[in-house]
Amino acid sequence: MTGHRILQWFSLLSILAMAFPAAPVQANSPAAPPPVPAVQQVYSPCKNRVNIQEEDMDWLFVPETASQLQTNLPYAFLAGQLIQNKVVNAENCPSGGLQSDGYANPCGLAVAKPYTDQVQNMYDEAILEAWRNTGVPPVMLKQLIRYESQFWPGQFGEAHYGLGHLTYYGAITGLTWYPPLRAEICTISGDCGSPLIDIQAMTLLSLMDVTCPTCAMKIDLERARRSVHYLAEVLLGHCYQVSQVVFNVAGIPSSSVVDYATIWKLTLFSYNAGPTCVYEAVNEAYETFPGGMGWRNIRNFIRGDQCIRGETYVDQITERFYQFTQ
């Protein structure tokens, strides 16, 4: 997720404002949330697990136990963070186990392997619990974390926070479209009376960075597990927003236009590339497939480098990784 989402976010203000002029829009304020339309659909397909095709089951499967999410993969970024934070001693490796970019070199990766195996699985129970609480597909959530952060829950650069590399505008979207998250975060921030959402967004971002110099593995595990829950709620908010965009385009309930797998692929698409990419692709696709459309139809109408990067992001997270079946 990069800074280009700022432009996408402001574009969505225009999209929703044109469709629902009664909704207030504070386009001049960078802290203004995307307006919730005056006409909202009551139902969305975000939790409607029906008609899932076998080809999508490996990333939409719901394991019975957290152990089914276990992985044991080498992660050079994660290993590099563990070495830099002195969790792993790689002094006997060339260059202290690190490449110039901060990733672990082959020796550092080998030394860190027992630790990277532990860290990449330490959130599995929280991921499954987040599914029970929010309905966000657990395999998809772990795959997103794998792709975004390699399970290191710190701050990356100036704009990306935590396991999901959440950005300010990603936080704004989640808080706006999933009110229970905003209620929870405003209680923590102590600012539930403000009409703006900026304080809550900054509080949420601070809760996503759970590195801890004095903790084992340099990670505050309890806060990290809680951040998985927040990330799931943010993704659910993105899903509700995307569902509304589909409704805006079609004028009928989004569940009549896209299925469960498609709404979650559109959610990932929006999380990475922004909601304007979703609107433009869905709008064009619906003109051709007014009776309903899947991701295969929609992706044919994705234009521009920025949106195409989002398409690639979806493919990477939903690729066949586990071998789950119905």
Image (cartoon, rainbow, N blue to C red):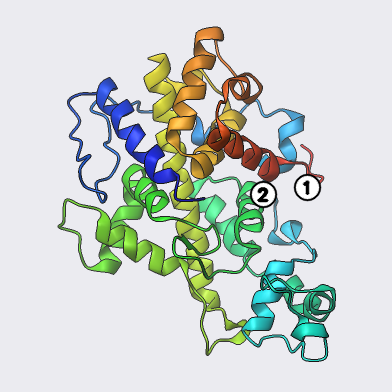
The image quadrant that residue 253 belongs to is top left
> Is there any visible trace of residue 121 in the rendered image?
no
**Badge 1, how many Cα within 10 Å: few under 14, some, many 20+?**
few
x then y, percent, for residue 16:
30, 28
x then y, percent, for residue 152:
61, 69
Q: Secondary structure at mark 1?
A: loop
Residue for badge 2: 139
x then y, percent, for residue 304:
55, 30
**Up/down of 295 relative to 88, above or below:** above
* Residue at horizontal 28 percent and vertical 21 percent from the top: 19
Find the residue positioned furthest to the front: 100
Residue type at tag 2: Val
Count of all numbered marks drawn on residues in the image: 2
The image quadrant that residue 263 belongs to is top right
Q: Nearer the viewer, mark 1 or mark 2?
A: 1
Question: Residue 321 shows which numbered tag?
Answer: 1
Q: Secondary structure at mark 2?
A: helix
* Residue at horizontal 19 percent and vertical 40 percent from the top: 26
